[in-house]
Amino acid sequence: MSERDARIDARALLRQWLALTDAEVTQAIDALGRRAIAAAAEASARLPRISDRSQAAERGLRDLEALARAIEAPPPRRGLSVFARAPKSSPPPVEAIVEQLDRERDAVVRTVLAIESDRTRFRAAADALDGALALVRACATAIEAAAREIAPDRPERARFLREVAAPRLLAREQDLAVQAAVTEQGLLTLAVYAENQGALAQALGRARDTSVAALRTAVAAREAVASGTTLAAQAAALDRTASAVADASAARPALSRALDDAIAQARRAVAARDRS
């Protein structure tokens, strides 16, 4: 609202107030800007929900970081068995992290849209508060002028305007100014949220496209190293077993042939691992 429009509206209100009782005038003053304050308060009430969404969306990155630390740790030692197949360790839940990152990236997009909607509400509330402030200030000026004008003929009414209506308008102006400051702070807060959500969306995208691929490679390498170490240990154990029964091989040709076959298979597997 421009100052000119505020002065026009204030003069129109003053004409109405001069025809009202004192109680009705104070009620009318208290009603100035009431809708603007209510709209601003409603917009401010949405800020905690935006904060909760922001914190929830960071969970996927924390899980990804924890998974990376788990992969960096050395693989657990396994018991050795000559003939038993090496036990398979459960792979870290990379795919579960991928799904969570996708969900949270979608949630970030929804949060950004919600932030833009809330910023629109805040701007509208701020504009309404500015208009109400301009009107209240114009009314204060109009009341002071009216009090001077009617003082000779209506001194009691002039005294009411100066001693009751004017302080009431000042209090209303202060209420509106406080709410306007709170609303402006809310707009700044939403701007910070929007910037953070944009950075979070980029981080989730990089984690989804780059970090997860690196984690998959790390998981595969970790499993290959762990399996290769166990396989080599089993081959060495077979060699020791073969040496232990070498003296009895003539009397037990079937056992000797079985051991020779097992050793050959283990060595071929180790050689294939080393070539890959």
Image (cartoon, helix red, strand yellow):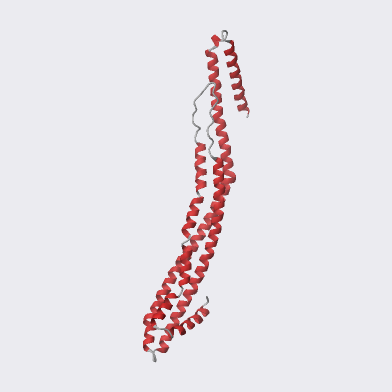
Image vertical order of residue 41 relative to residue 54, above or below: below
Q: Quadrant of residue 267?
A: top right
Residue 191 vs 32, above or below: the answer is above
Say which residue appears at 42% left-offset and 71% top-offset: 175
Quarter of image, res 153: bottom left
Q: In the image, residue 260 lies at what x, y percent?
A: 59, 16
Name of the residue lying farthest toward the bottom: 153
Q: In this orientation, which residue lies closer to the viewer: 204 or 107?
A: 107
Horizontal side of 19 relative to 71 (left or right) equals: left
Residue 266 is situated, as x and y percent measured from the top left of the image, at 59, 22
Q: In which quadrant of the rendered view does residue 227 lie?
A: top right
Which image quarter is the C terminus in? Answer: top right
Vertical comparison of 71 with 172: above or below: above
Residue 208 spot, x, y in % from top left = 58, 46
Q: Of 261 and 216, which appears nearest the observer?
A: 261
- Residue placed at 38% from the left, 78% from the top? 167
Q: Residue at x 52, y 47 (%)?
A: 60
x then y, percent, for residue 165 = 39, 80
- Extreme-top residue of the structure: 251
Camera-side residue: 45 or 223?
A: 45
Q: How many marks?
A: 0
